[in-house]
Image (cartoon, coloured by chain):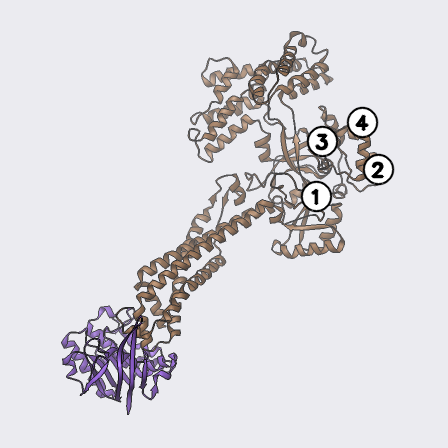
Chain colours: A brown, B purple
């Protein structure tokens, strides 16, 4: 009791020591609790972002994988070579039967593809070609399209020599050829007999003139093959934004809504969207942001991408509207558009609204629209390229982290199309292809159904010449798609085939380690030839970020408390020296060394508990007030880390208890040396005047 | 009965390699219940002699016996026990524990003992506070007391565990003469009442005149005994 009394009274009698020790312990405990809470909330956020979107709790893949699996690709952005697993149905059935903690298994396979939907001239020429092929001849529409094509051609020369030639070096010989082709396309004689010779004329324009348009129409699509309805059912955060999911058993794609809005959308429009978001959500100003000013400059310099898409008639109408809107007498649409796109903080919103109400409906707002079919080309690791025509059924996002670029980086494709694009070459198939390529001089081949474990005869029939032709991309792809796209695959078709990796969702994620051991054991027993990794490893560098952040946090806490040890120790040594005579007196009147040791130790304990509790109380207040309202995600990356637009913090008494224990241990270590030194104070020092 | 015995006691201090003799072959016997003053000028060896008797320091040579114990043969733990049970200290600067009040300071030596019940502790503490006349100041801290009051607290603390010997190192040095006289009177009164052996050092002649036995010491040697 006397020890407690003395310890408490010493808190007030040695004010400087108390102030130093108290400040160190309060701040240390406060930052430790807030830091741990923050980092664990982020970890949990990242875990949710990953496990509820793409990784699942576990991932399985072939034991023969050459590279370490990472669902987001390696550090170079390419997919690791993880080989493939023969039959999804076999793996699924055995694992679901043998491992009780498995909720669902979603087959997957990632790859990159190139999509070239063509530029505006390609699109108009394709429309024109279709018009000529229609049974009912629409003369007015053909005339309008021809006028539009003509207008684009008239604008190409300036565009080509001002923009393209400044980026790509063009020889004098090529320049002369370009000029000659353009002269041909602009000549009156070219258009005079256009209708009669439309196929040759369109082909000339497609081959010679359309490539002169410099644009960024090629899309690089990161996609993931899966069974769409299984994916949607298994990942609770999945939701369709536009259109529909791929119907069960059909070929098709659903793009991530972010990809659709930020990559597929017309770039002038998406820059306007970004400026709007920066102004309204991030409270930036055009005047104060160099990035926003650069976007405006880009829009002005690329205004041709807007007016080239307008038919001459529509352009005339928009000129009148722009003149009224801008109070301008200018009649040149190029200059009017440049002036219109020169936005500032005051006029942005009205111009944004005008753009979407008066201009956007008449331009190609999305390179690929929901509901359209487009060609997709991939290059397999076997060195072959494969193309398919795929219908985009819709767009999707993951609820609460729709703005996160990482969790929404995967466009979904049906598993059958994925297998076709993956282009697995078995030795037999390799031989067969070589023979066919030699015969047909084909370079691009896609082989449907090649991975199915059907008999070789049937397989051989499936790869007939006509089928191969149908899967090679040509400009008239829509008819080809009809032959593939209409086929509905059964569940057995989907499941009886290869997959690269599969996400496993667990009934109880807390039993992850035990489940992994169980899967390994089943794989060993049943010779499944698969390996299993947890979501952190499956997410590669991103998953390791969690570990990195934790290491960073614990290093920070370690440094804070490490420094605290020295500060507290120093403060206690000073206090001990101040009490030298007092301790000597206690020893002189009969106090054993043990009494002195326990007295000082208890004092350290009381101080550490008292001040650590104060720090924890402070952290509790901050977490309840600030964390309860949620820390807003300041950018898209933060959205991923926060698993939503805000990070909510929850006070965990276990963290607090851990920090309290740590503070006590730190104080005990810090107090040990001074307390030990105090026991060495000789009783005779009670009589001395100095020490 | 001998309470304290010193036989050929030598105490040297060392300043680097220089030997500074503090006591030179001192022989002294003090019986139980004696009220003895060690007198001498500053630096004569009074405090050194008290330190050796109080078991807070050890002799370079010779034998220091307290009660029947040869202190040189006791472990540090036993010496501490001897100080707790047998010796009471009264210091020149009072040496009270600043964070404790009068009651707690007086009670402190009893708290170090395990052989005294809580009830007895309280009774003895109150008895000695009352004996030194500080009943009204029990909850005062040392810094709220005068010099004389502080020394009374120190006396109560020295006596509360009923030691056989009380050592007082110049107990009146920091007090005015009236207060000093009162403190000496108090110690004499307790000596007579409790039969406690008192050994205190001083160089104040007025105080010396009140002692029954005076041992004069000079340059580390006993020069006279009265």
Residue placed under numbered mark 4 in the picture: A440
Residue placed under numbered mark 1 in the picture: A500
| Quadrant in the rendering for residue B97 | bottom left
Q: Which part of the image, by quadrant, shows the N terminus of chain B?
A: bottom left
Residue placed under numbered mark 3 in the picture: A387
Mark closer to the chain start, 4 or 3: 3
Q: Is residue A470 left or right of residue B116?
A: right
Q: Report x, y in % for residue B35.
A: 22, 86
Q: Are marks 2 and 3 in contact (CB under 8 Å)?
A: no
Please, which chain is the residue tagged with disc 3 on?
Answer: A
Q: Are marks 4 and 3 in contact (CB under 8 Å)?
A: no
- Counting other residues with Cα less than 10 Å from the Cα at mark 1, is it few (<14), some (14-19), or many (20 or more)? many
Q: Are marks 4 and 1 in contact (CB under 8 Å)?
A: no
Please, which chain is the residue tagged with disc 2 on?
Answer: A
What numbered label is drawn on residue A310?
A: none
| Quadrant in the rendering for residue A213 | top right
Mark closer to the chain start, 1 or 3: 3
- Counting other residues with Cα less than 10 Å from the Cα at mark 3, is it few (<14), some (14-19), or many (20 or more)? many
Residue placed under numbered mark 2 in the picture: A458
Q: Is A468 placed above or below A164 here?
A: below
Mark closer to the chain start, 2 or 4: 4
Mark 2–mark 1 distance (CA, rounded to whole Å): 24 Å
Residue at 72 percent across and 14 percent down: it is A200
């Amino acid at each position: 009791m006397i020890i407690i009394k003395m310890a408490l009274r010493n808190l007030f009698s040695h004010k400087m020591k108390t102030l130093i020790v108290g400040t160190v312990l309060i701040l240390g405990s406060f930052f430790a609790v807030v830091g741990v809470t923050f980092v664990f909330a982020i970890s949990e956020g990242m875990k949710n972002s990953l496990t509820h979107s793409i990784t699942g709790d576990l991932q399985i893949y072939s034991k023969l994988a050459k590279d370490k699996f990472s669902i987001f690709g390696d550090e170079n952005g390419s997919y690791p070579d993880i080989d493939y697993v023969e039959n999804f149905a076999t793996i699924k059935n055995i694992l679901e039967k043998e491992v009780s903690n498995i909720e669902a298994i979603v087959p997957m396979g990632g790859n990159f593809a190139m999509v070239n939907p063509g530029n505006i001239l390609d699109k108009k020429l394709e429309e024109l070609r279709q018009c000529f092929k229609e049974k009912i001849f629409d003369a007015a529409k053909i005339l309008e399209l021809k006028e539009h094509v003509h207008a684009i051609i008239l604008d190409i020369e300036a565009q080509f020599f001002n923009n393209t030639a400044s980026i790509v070096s063009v020889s004098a010989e090529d320049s002369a050829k370009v000029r000659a082709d353009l002269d041909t396309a602009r000549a009156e004689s070219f258009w005079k007999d256009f209708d009669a010779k439309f196929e040759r004329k369109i082909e000339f324009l497609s081959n010679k003139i359309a490539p002169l348009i410099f644009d960024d129409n090629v899309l690089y699509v990161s996609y993931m093959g899966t069974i769409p309805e299984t994916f949607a059912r298994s990942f609770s955060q999945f939701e369709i934004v536009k259109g529909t999911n791929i119907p069960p058993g059909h070929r098709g794609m659903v793009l991530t809504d972010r990809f659709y809005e930020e990559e597929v959308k017309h770039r002038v429009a998406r820059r306007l969207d970004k400026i709007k978001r920066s102004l309204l959500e991030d409270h930036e100003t055009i005047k104060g942001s160099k990035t926003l000013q650069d976007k405006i400059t880009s829009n002005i310099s690329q205004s041709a991408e807007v007016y080239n898409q307008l038919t001459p008639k529509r352009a005339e109408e928009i000129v009148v509207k722009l003149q009224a809107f801008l109070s301008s007498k200018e009649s040149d649409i190029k200059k009017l558009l440049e002036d219109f796109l020169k936005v500032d903080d005051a006029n942005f919103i009205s111009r944004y609204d005008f753009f979407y109400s008066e201009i956007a409906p008449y331009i190609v707002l999305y390179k690929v629209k929901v509901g359209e079919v487009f060609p997709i080309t991939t290059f397999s690791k076997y060195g072959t390229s494969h193309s398919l025509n795929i219908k985009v059924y819709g767009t999707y996002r993951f609820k609460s982290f729709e703005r996160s670029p990482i969790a929404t980086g995967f466009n979904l494709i049906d598993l059958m199309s994925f297998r076709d694009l993956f282009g697995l070459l078995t030795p037999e198939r390799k031989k067969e292809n070589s023979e066919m390529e030699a015969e047909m001089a084909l370079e691009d081949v896609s082989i449907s159904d090649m991975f199915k474990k059907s008999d070789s005869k049937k397989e051989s029939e499936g790869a007939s010449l006509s089928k191969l032709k149908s899967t090679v991309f040509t400009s008239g792809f829509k008819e080809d798609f009809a032959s593939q796209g209409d086929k509905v695959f059964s569940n057995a078709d989907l499941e009886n085939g290869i997959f690269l990796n599969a996400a496993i969702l667990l009934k109880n994620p807390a039993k992850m380690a035990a489940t992994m051991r169980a899967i390994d054991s089943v794989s060993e027993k049943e010779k499944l030839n698969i390996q299993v990794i947890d979501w952190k490893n499956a997410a590669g560098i991103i998953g390791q970020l969690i570990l990195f952040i934790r290491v960073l946090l614990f290093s920070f806490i370690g440094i804070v408390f490490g420094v605290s040890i020295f500060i507290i120790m120093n403060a206690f040594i000073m206090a001990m020296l101040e009490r030298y005579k007092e301790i000597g007196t206690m020893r002189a009147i009969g106090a054993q060394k043990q009494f002195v040791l326990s007295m000082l130790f208890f004092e350290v304990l009381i101080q550490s508990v008292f001040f650590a509790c104060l720090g924890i109380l402070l952290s509790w207040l901050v977490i309840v007030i600030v964390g309860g309202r949620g820390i807003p995600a300041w950018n898209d990356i933060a959205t991923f880390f926060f698993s939503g637009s805000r990070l909510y913090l929850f006070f965990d008494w276990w963290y607090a208890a851990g920090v309290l224990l740590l503070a006590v241990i730190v104080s005990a270590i810090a107090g040990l040396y001074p307390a030990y030194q105090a026991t060495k104070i000789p009783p005779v020092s009670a009589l001395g005047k100095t020490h | 009965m001998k309470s304290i015995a010193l036989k050929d006691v030598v105490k040297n201090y060392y300043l680097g390699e220089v030997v500074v003799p503090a006591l030179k072959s001192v022989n002294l016997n003090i019986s139980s219940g004696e009220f003895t003053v060690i007198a001498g000028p500053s630096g004569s060896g009074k405090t050194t002699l008290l330190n050796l008797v109080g078991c807070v320091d050890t002799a370079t040579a010779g034998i220091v016996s307290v009660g029947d114990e040869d202190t040189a043969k006791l472990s540090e733990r036993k010496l501490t026990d001897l100080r707790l049970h047998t010796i009471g200290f009264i210091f020149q600067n009072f040496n009270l524990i600043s964070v404790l009040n009068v009651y707690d300071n007086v009670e402190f030596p009893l708290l170090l003992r395990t052989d005294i019940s809580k009830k007895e502790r309280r009774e003895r503490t109150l008895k000695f506070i009352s004996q030194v006349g500080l009943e009204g100041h029990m909850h005062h801290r040392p810094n709220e007391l005068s010099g004389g009051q502080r020394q009374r607290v120190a006396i109560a603390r020295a006596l509360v565990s009923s030691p056989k010997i009380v050592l007082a190192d110049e107990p009146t040095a920091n007090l005015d003469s009236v207060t000093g006289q009162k403190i000496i009177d108090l110690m004499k009164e307790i000596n007579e009442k409790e039969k406690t052996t008192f050994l205190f050092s001083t160089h104040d002649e007025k105080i010396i005149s009140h002692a029954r036995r005076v041992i004069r010491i000079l340059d580390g040697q006993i020069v006279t005994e009265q």
